Image (tube, rainbow, N blue to C red):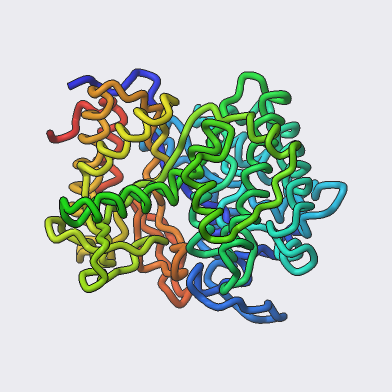
Amino acid sequence: MKLFPQDFLWGGAVAANQVEGAYREAGKGLSTSDVQPQGIFGDVVERREGDFGIKDVAIDFYHQYPQDIALFAEMGFKCLRTSIAWTRIFPHGDEDQPNEAGLAFYDSLFDEMAKYGIQPVVTLSHYEMPWELVKKHGGWGNRKTIGFFEHYARTVFQRYQHKVKYWLTFNEINMSLHAPLTGVGLPAGSSKAEIYQAIHHQLVASAKAVKACHEIIPDAKIGNMLLGGLMYPLSCQPQDVWETLQQNRTWLFFGDVQCRGEYPGYMLRYFRENNITLDITPEDRQALKTTIDFISFSYYMTGCVTADEELNRKSRGNILDMVPNPHLPSSEWGWQIDPTGLRILLNMLWDRYQKPLFIVENGLGAKDKISADGAIHDDYRISYLNDHLVQVAEAIDDGVEVMGYTSWGPIDIVSASKAEMSKRYGFIYVDRDDHGEGTLTRRRKDSFYWYSEVIASNGESLKR
């Protein structure tokens, strides 16, 4: 088995709205995340003076990032994936001039990372957009939002061109099909035609951001980010196999457009058969020809697909609905654990696109308990991550070009789906509960020391 490349980017991944807090500090505007205090699957709640949501403080990364970056450096991180809160830079989204206080915060954050030689991997839009763009302009349903996003992207590229060399456009861009408010700023109940039109605007905006990045930071790399929703057929019946192909195409479509620069034929047929007519201009088609440099994706689980409605019992896993696989164990949250699926997905994406791949989310959410001696023995997390990383090594041996691996939530964060602290992913424990109570004190878990050794040995310490 091949070892990991010497320049492999080991690290972790977080998102601004799940760690920073300081939700109205230094001129920050309200985002779609701020009005979803119970998470992606919760109701929209207009904010009022004196109200409270757990993400308002989150883990207070906005104020405590120096100690957190030091802990990441202690583990040996080569990179840290985080996001810029669009509303720190343009509080309403449609301003001409950016908010200097917001820009200055990320300058300080990136400078702190540079002290330890940690490379920032920055997502431009991670599960949030300015709430004012939704209320005033209709979110991504409005073509004007392309221009607002491009202005934002060019602003941060210009500002951080010497500090950030790895960029991602939209986090899990395919999740708009499952949570349209979070993804494209459209209300629940929006039609497929409305959602796909908004997605089209987002794909054009992504391509324009790629073009701007290449112009402003020629030595940077910019990629997309997919929710890797790999599905297997529940049986070998041809109907199940065909249905599985169709299900996988619902998310691969985004990669096809962003990697190949045009809409694939199977989506054009889908639009025809569902009476969906998109407004696609000649300028849009030209813009989409600017393609990404690499593909990044999240991977947590796989699921099964069947054409048999009687067998079509579904469970919610991350954003996707899928039929449980009878051959796989599940986590406390019902997410099925499938390390081999990561190797399959890496090979599938490499075969399909022949572009470098970057695993920017993978991890195990669990209810960690503090032992009497103050230690946190999370051997279940170590086992999960070890087994997945062994499969990454196998994929590299298969000939797949893998740039790096950032575990999701290297420090405990507020979960996106339900805004919980009890669903913990981190190597670092944060003393805060689902009600927002706690000291926010950080402490190392057993997995902290395990991951440190994995990075120091460049993967040689993994148990195969």
Residue at 74 percent across and 44 percent down: it is 152
Horizontal and vertical percent position of residue 165: 59, 27
Front-lying residue, 76 or 151: 151
Front-lying residue, 264 or 135: 264
In what quadrant of the picture does the N terminus appear?
A: top left
Front-lying residue, 256 or 98: 256
Horizontal and vertical percent position of residue 135: 75, 69
Q: Please state if 268 lies on the left or on the right of 413 as rendered.
A: right
| The quarter of the displayed image where residue 23 is located | bottom right
**Residue 410 is at least partly visible in this image:** no
**Residue 315 is at least partly visible in this image:** yes
Residue at 78 percent across and 63 percent down: it is 137
Horizontal and vertical percent position of residue 364: 29, 54
Residue at 73 percent across and 25 percent down: it is 216
In this view, 348 is above or below 50 = above
In this view, 391 is above or below 42 = above
In what quadrant of the picture does the C terminus appear?
A: top left
Q: Please state if 41 lies on the left or on the right of 386 as rendered.
A: right
Q: Please state if 147 lies on the left or on the right of 312 as rendered.
A: right
Front-lying residue, 276 or 72: 276
Residue at 55 percent across and 67 percent down: it is 55
| The quarter of the displayed image where residue 413 is located | bottom left
| The quarter of the displayed image where residue 73 is located | top left
Looking at the rendered structure, the number of numbered marks drawn on it comes to 0
Residue placed farthest to the right in the image? 96
In this view, 9 is above or below 306 = above
